[in-house]
Amino acid sequence: MAHTISNKNKLLARVRRIHGQTAALEKLLDGGGDCIATLQQIAAIRGAVNGLMVAVIEGHLSEHVVQEPLLEQRQQDLDVVLQVIKSYLK
């Protein structure tokens, strides 16, 4: 996955942001935080994870599907992505 290496800093920044959001959620739950604040934090985490997923899928499709010269390999890579998307959306 060359695209995850080339975009490593951006992806790690997203992961660190998600880590901070989950730590804030843990503090809210541990401290008996407000329901609305908890729901907002969960929604923010979900949005951040979805953004990370989109970035990685976009990189994968660009690197391994669009630019792949072999049609058979391109189909295999596409099948893998579709499997991940289907499991993610369950």
Image: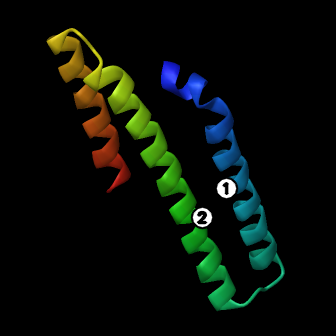
How crowded is the residue under tag 1: few (<14 C-alpha within 10 Å), some, or many (20+)? some
Q: Which residue is mark 1?
A: 18
Q: Nearer the viewer, residue 67 or 56?
A: 67
Question: Is residue 53 shown left or right of residue 69?
Answer: right
The residue under label 1 is which amino acid type? Ile
Locate residue 40, reporting x and y percent. Answer: 61, 80
Residue at (64, 40) in percent of width and height: 10
Gap in angstroms between the C-alphas marked 1 and 2:
6 Å
Left or right: where 28 falls relative to 90: right
Q: Is residue 36 depicted above or below 12 in this figure?
A: below
Answer with the quarter of the image where residue 79 lies: top left
Residue at the image point whose x is 59% and y is 81% from the top: 39
The residue positioned 66% from the left and 81% from the top of the image is: 38
- Which residue does the image show at 28% across and 47% down from the upper left? 86
Question: For this rendering, which residue is in front, 3 or 78?
Answer: 3
Q: Quadrant of residue 85?
A: top left
Name the spot of residue 47 as percent of width and height, x first: 52, 64
- Furthest toward the left, the residue is 71
Q: Contact (CB < 8 A) between labels 1 and 2?
A: yes
